[in-house]
Image (cartoon, rainbow, N blue to C red):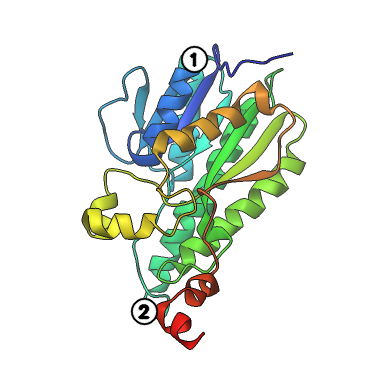
Amino acid sequence: MVIPLDLGGRVALVTGGTKGIGLGITQALLAAGAAVVTCSRSDADPVPGATHLVCDVRDADAVERLVAEVVAAHRRLDVLVNNAGGAPHALAAEASPRFHDKVVGLNLMAPLVAAQAANRVMQSQPEGGSIVNVSSVSATRPSPGTAAYGAAKAGLDSLTRSLAVEWAPRVRMNSIDVGLCRTENTDDHYGGDDGVAAIERTIPLGRMARPEEVGHVAAFLASDLASYVSGARIECHGGGEPPVFLSALTSPSTQEQN
């Protein structure tokens, strides 16, 4: 039996869903037939076909109001994608406790609060629901310069597994550990095309992800195709990061010694 990736009739909320990876997720969910609501801290032009609401996901009361507004408009909530997150570069020894608190708040506590609000709705629905947490490869490897971010994402993956047990069988919980992704800010962040090309040469698939590719994974996890997938951490990273010793073995100095 072939089950199509069909989200028709379902309502999805994507935090930070108007740009970058969030935009790719929103577009993938729309393409699968879902009614999509996005949110961000400030007003933004809605993604064509979606509805946009303003909400600071770090504010628990605002998140409650957001979910209530989605349910009032659509009478249900089937999918939550906790995408909003990120952190600027800052060395752990130099950053203030307030800085670390904000990073952890956005990348761990905000998804938890949003998931709690969504779960209360989904548990009351016969069909339940699906919650997808957008995590990072920084959750499973050292994250120098963004240490609190990596720790928060590791916590998010752990949280996903725990909630998959607590909220089963009605709600499925999964996370996506995203690697490097090409967005509107990539060139500025990595110093233009030359910097991006140098980084992409280290990725086994030879390039960064496109936002819609992360979106396809999120749409799969939200759909009936993943009806028996819960508590999973899906790695969307193009093959990961080859061990550093491999590049050392092929460096000119090593070859000369051999």
Q: Residues within 10 Å of mark 1 (few under 14, many from 20)?
A: some
Name which quarter of the figure residue 201 lies in: bottom left
Foreground residue, 121 or 16? Answer: 16
Give the residue type at disc 1.
Gly
Percent position of residue 33, x then y: 49, 15
Q: Is residue 65 visible?
A: no
**Residue assigned mark 1:** 33
Q: Is residue 76 visible?
A: yes
Percent position of residue 148, x then y: 48, 66
Q: Residue at x 43, y 76 (%)?
A: 251
Identify the image quadrant of the N terminus: top right
Q: Are marks 1 and 2 in contact (CB under 8 Å)?
A: no
Percent position of residue 54, x then y: 34, 34
SS class of the residue under badge 2? loop
* Horizontal arrangement in the rendering, residue 170 relative to residue 23 (left or right): right
Give the residue type at disc 2.
Glu
Pair 1/2: label in front: 1
Foreground residue, 218 or 55? Answer: 218
Which residue occupies the extreme bottom position in the image? 257
Percent position of residue 30, x then y: 44, 20
Q: Residue at x 22, y 55 (%)?
A: 192
